[in-house]
Amino acid sequence: MESRKKAVEIRQVSKTFGTFQALETVSLDIYDNEFFTLLGPSGCGKTTLLRMIAGFEEPTTGQIVLHGSDIQSLPPHKRRVNTVFQSYALFPHMTLEQNVAYGLENLRWPKDKVRARVAEMLDLVHMSKFARRRPQQLSGGQRQRVALARALAPEPEVLLLDEPLSALDLKLRQAMREELRALQRQTGLTFVFVTHDQEEALDMSDRICVLGDGRIQQIGSPREVYENPANRFVANFIGETNFFDVDVLSVEGDQAKVRTPMGMELTATQKHVRPGQKQATLSLRPEKIGLDDQASGQILSGTITSTNYLGGFTHYVVRVGDADIRVSRRNDLSDTPTLAEGATVKLGFSPAATRVLGQ
Amino acid sequence: MKDFRFWGLLPAHVMMALTLIVPILIIVAVSFATRGAYGGFEFSFSTEAYRQILFNEGWTGELEFNPQYLLIIGRTVILAALTTLICMALAFPVAYWITLQGRTARVILLFMVTLPFWVSMIVRVYAWLIILGNEGVIEKALKLTGLVTDIDTLLFNSGAMLVGMVYSYIPLMILPVFASIEKLDPALIEASHDLHGSRAVTLRRVILPLCWPGLAAGAILVFVPCLGAVLEPILLGGGKIMMMGNLIQMQFGGARNWPFGAAIAILLMVLVMVFLLLNGLRATRRAMEEMT
Ligand SMILES: Nc1ncnc2c1ncn2[C@@H]1O[C@H](COP(=O)(O)OP(=O)(O)OP(=O)(O)O)[C@@H](O)[C@H]1O
Ligand SMILES: [Mg+2]
């Protein structure tokens, strides 16, 4: 990864609106041909960061570098990046063709090349049939595709996408996810994708940058951020988990000896504990816990206080001592019956499946 | 139900008939009557009044072309069109600037735009007489710069009339243009910049086309009353430069030629209707385009 060419470098960038600091100082690199996702809850500064790359907001401090050159002084229309807007922002007074041609005409492409490129782009997103229509005559998903074609047409160095799927219904959203991902592979373009939907991020990205409270919480592959969350924020935001406050007894490589409040001593996996850290949070994902006959490894016993049947999975809350532990069990081949509330169950998990988080 | 609709709306129909249709019919009738010996008109059918717009009758009854009224009509249309264009050019940046202000500032500014309507039109036009008049602000300022020393007068010409008309009608342009700019989605402007459109390109290809409905509405509101303007020609034009409105007024007044006055009034109405029709056609064509 490190040897790849950097497409975008965010260097020590921060943003303050009046007295409100939307983004603390952040630095990150985005590589060529990468599907890079900015993930975080509402208001964490994702759009702000994207708009600074596009040039619509000016960083309060720091600089933004595109393929090696500082673009700080360039106005938005001179930056070789294009944006897919959340609201699509298609020009209502132009046909789809004209919408897609707009960027090319501004770049002074010759007429015949514009025509060819527009046709190619509309074809790419399966919208050739509708070339002469206007945006108002399209469905949400079709508008989405045209917005994509319009942004791709001028051959940007980086494509910015601000929650492009959030206005679509669930089925369409899933279909578009795949299309978008395929398109990115096909064009080999660098995508910077903004979303607050963790599932979307896990599904599509090469790398995810988790933003929270105006700071970068973690950058890594989908597997890394899910399996080895850097801190409580990330573990909580991506997927569900059980937290335990533990004392750190000793650390050796990626293993840490910890003691739970119940006095149990475990050897857990760690990647983010700082030297000398005494207190830590232990995270255990609900699907890594086995119940009854599936319980193995470290065994506990508790009472089921709630069950939620969700089709593919059943979610349980089990009271162990004075802690509520969430467990997720797959309704698999063996056609496991749902355990009743109030039943006493055995819980089992492998210590290696627990993660000691950083701070 | 149908009955109720008819009887319920009867007062409105009666009002329309009495205040709109009947008067128009009377004017049409008068325009086809004959001029009375001592003013007024006599009921005997004649197209004389319409002929008079273009032709004089010589001593022996032969017709000779008389461009005098055509000139007035032409001047009226040109001045009205010029006023409309200048109003558009001035109103757009003003309206745009107002949309950029904060909430309260916007309300205050819009109120100020409409403020002149609270004062009588005569008073407002009269004010320009003082501004443009001898020893007026502008003349004095020009003399102070030393560039111009000998000014006869700034008043009593088409320019003065134009200034007066632009001033009178520009609020009617600012308001609809403001409304259309305010409705503009800022994301579209950003999208234009994002797609490599400079400010000028964005203005020309995105902002102006999308504000066109507002500009067209403003054009109607300004152009139509300008065609019938009476006050500005009298006060600022000094009565020397006539427009259609003055011509009509004169026929019913001093000239005592009611049929001719009525004929010109009808012509003015036809001009307005043609203009509205053209505007309507444009809108329809646009709507059709959007459907297909
Ligand atoms: N122009 C602005 N003026 C003042 N504050 C702003 C401005 N733009 C954004 N903010 C604030 O900055 C913070 C980050 O905004 P941003 O739009 O980047 O959030 P986001 O992560 O994109 O959220 P969402 O998922 O809701 O779109 C928010 O608290 C927002 O209120
Ligand atoms: Mg956002």
Image (tube, coloured by chain):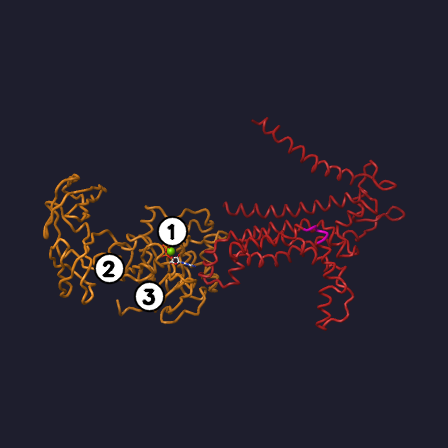
Chain colours: A orange, B red
Disc count in the image?
3
Q: Is residue B242 magenta?
A: no
- Could you tell me residue B147's position as x and y percent? 72, 72
**In the visual, does A338 lie left or right of A139?**
left
Q: Identify the residue under disc 3.
A: A26
Q: Is the residue at mark 3 from the same chain as the one at mark 2?
A: yes
Packing grade of label 2 (10 A; few <14, some 14-19, many >=20) is: many
- Few, some or many residues within 10 Å of mark 1 (<14, 14–19, 20+): some
In primary-sequence order, the first of circles 1 and 2 is 1
Q: Nearer the viewer, residue B270 or B15?
A: B15
Q: List the residue tagged with mark 1.
A: A126
Q: Dividing the image into four equal quarters, which quarter contains ligand 2? A: bottom left
Q: CA distance from mark 1 to mark 3?
A: 38 Å
Residue at left offset 34%, top offset 62%: A190
The answer as to whether callout 3 falls within 8 Å of ligand 1 is no
As shown in the figure, which amino acid type bears the numbered disc 1? His
Does B120 lie within the magenta span?
A: yes
The span shown in magenta is B119-123
